[in-house]
Amino acid sequence: MTVEVGDVAPAFTLYDTDKNSRSLGEFRGKNVVLAFFPGAFTGLCTKEMCTFQDQLQEFNQSNCQVIGITVDSPFAQKEWTDKNNIDYPFLSDFNRQVVAEYDVTFKNLAGLEGYVSANRAIVVVDPEGIIKYKWIAPNPGVEPDYDEIRTAVK
């Protein structure tokens, strides 16, 4: 299934870094930036998620919740977010269901045959639950346009 701009964002519930269930629905009434990325403890992923942390106040002022999503375990995410002083929610899609529903999977990351991760992708969901912006990296080594994302949530 492919979801596109204008579609209702697929609902999901995933574990956060404290192993609590978190759902997309709990953020209804806010803009939501779903920041999918390949993996914690990697250079560009760290740079991207720290950039969101550095700009978090601006996103919050736009009634926006940033959420990081990767296929890493909640345990790895916890260590990584603590190490990088990231305080917005990170959700673990360890069963890869959400990356498949949002059509943002990346196969054979770093040449690891059979390994499926999230691609680097951004999905902005409006307060009513409609996808208003979607960007998928042509490859995981490309960063998103942060100005474009901030514009999408305003």
Image (cartoon, helix red, strand yellow):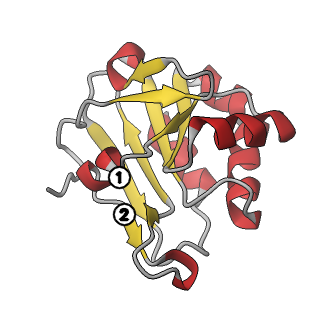
Is residue 85 placed above or below 44 in the rendered structure? Answer: above
Task: Classify mark 1: helix, strand or loop.
Answer: helix
Disc 1 target residue: 99
Horizontal placement of 32 versus 62: left or right? Answer: left
Give the camera-side residue of 60 and 78. Answer: 78
Name the one closer to the observer, 101 or 112.
112
Pointer 2 local density, CA inside 10 Å: few below 14, some 14–19, many at least 20: many
Quarter holding the N terminus is bottom left
Picture coordinates of residue 37, whole percent (x, y) = 54, 56
Q: Position of residue 95 (x, y in %)?
A: 36, 46
Q: What residue type is labelled 2?
A: Thr
Name the residue located 67 percent from the left edge and 58 percent from the top edge.
45
Answer few, some or many: residues within 10 Å of disc 1's Cα (few below 14, many 20 plus, some between 14 and 19).
Answer: many
Residue 42 appearing in the image: yes
Q: What amino acid type should be assigned to the residue bearing mark 1?
A: Val
Q: Answer with left or right where residue 147 lies relative to residue 100.
A: right
Say which quarter of the image contains residue 38.
bottom right
Picture disc at residue 105: 2
* Residue at (27, 22) in percent of width and height: 128
